[in-house]
Amino acid sequence: PASDEGPVLPELTLKLSLIEGRNLVGVAGAGASFTASVACTVRGETIQSTPVPMADGVHTFGKEEQLVLPLDAVLVNELVAQPIELSFYQHEAKGNHTTLVGTSLLHLDPLLAEASMQEVLPVTRSALVPPPPAPPAPREEGEGEEEGAPAPDVAQESEGSIAVSVELNRALVDEEDHDIDEGMLRTLHVSLDKMYNLPSKWVLGPEQLEEEHPFAYTAKVTVPLPNGREYPIFFPGGTLRR
């Protein structure tokens, strides 16, 4: 059916569940208990859990949010082309001060064919969180050991993770829509590896180290859509190499 403003778009119901975080590390380092929350943004809508304390290494967020969105090619591109970034914050006991302690990326590609997905995602620590301890240096045979003594138990620090699930009222793309012979919706995968012949002012100096270069770079690819619209795809975090 159509109205004066164009065809009526079907609705997509998206329910995002931020379930729990395990072995998250705060500014005091591994093993220290702290209160945390998790947040992300979907289609301009901010979804944030309430701050919860750590119990036995687990933050039980239990946050569910349901969004109702008009389903069209633009929405499909927005959900699939760029991952949703989850941000983890440490909350201080007094005041409203928060500190970003980690991030994680949720890729929604499986929803092109399935109406639900559940993932356990690794968490990348922020620069304000102490790095994991270096592994112990290897010892020479017999060094510092008594005959018959058991080998020392070196605890390995577990990496943090977040359990999430996404449920839709339908898959983003119907199975029959993958039939390109019928002229229906196509999927386009764009990857960007390297760029060559950069402007001379971007090139590293003869004695400049790669890690000393002060800039990161973002590439933009524009994909044409129906009705004269365009969809931009961004590739952030590019680094300069010799």
Image (cartoon, rainbow, N blue to C red):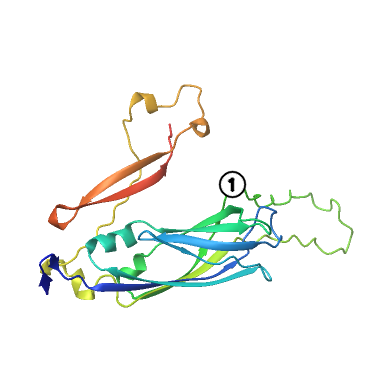
Q: Is residue 68 left or right of residue 132?
A: left
Identify the residue at horizontal 62%, vertical 47% (top origin). 128
Q: Is residue 148 left or right of residue 107?
A: right
Mark 1 residue type: Ala
Q: Quadrant of residue 152?
A: bottom right
Identify the residue at horizontal 56%, vertical 67% (top origin). 50
Q: Is residue 29 left or right of residue 127?
A: right
Identity of the residue furthest to the top in this view? 206
Q: Is residue 203 above or below residue 126?
A: above
Identity of the residue furthest to the right in this view? 146
Helix, strand or loop at mark 1? loop
Q: Quadrant of the N terminus?
A: bottom left
x, y percentage for residue 131? 64, 50
x, y percentage for residue 76? 28, 63
Residue 29 makes an appearance in the image: yes
Q: Quadrant of residue 201?
A: top left
Find disc 1 in the rendering and name its residue.
Answer: 127
Q: Is residue 83 above or below residue 64?
A: above
Q: Quadrant of the C terminus?
A: top left
Decide: few, some or many residues near mark 1? Use Cα within 10 Å; few <14, some 14-19, many ≥20: few
Marks counted in the figure total 1
Residue 106 makes an appearance in the image: no
Identify the residue at horizontal 22%, vertical 65% (top origin). 72
Identity of the residue furthest to the bottom in this view? 169
x, y percentage for residue 98? 60, 54
x, y percentage for residue 12? 29, 72
Identify the residue at horizontal 22%, vertical 73% (top origin). 10
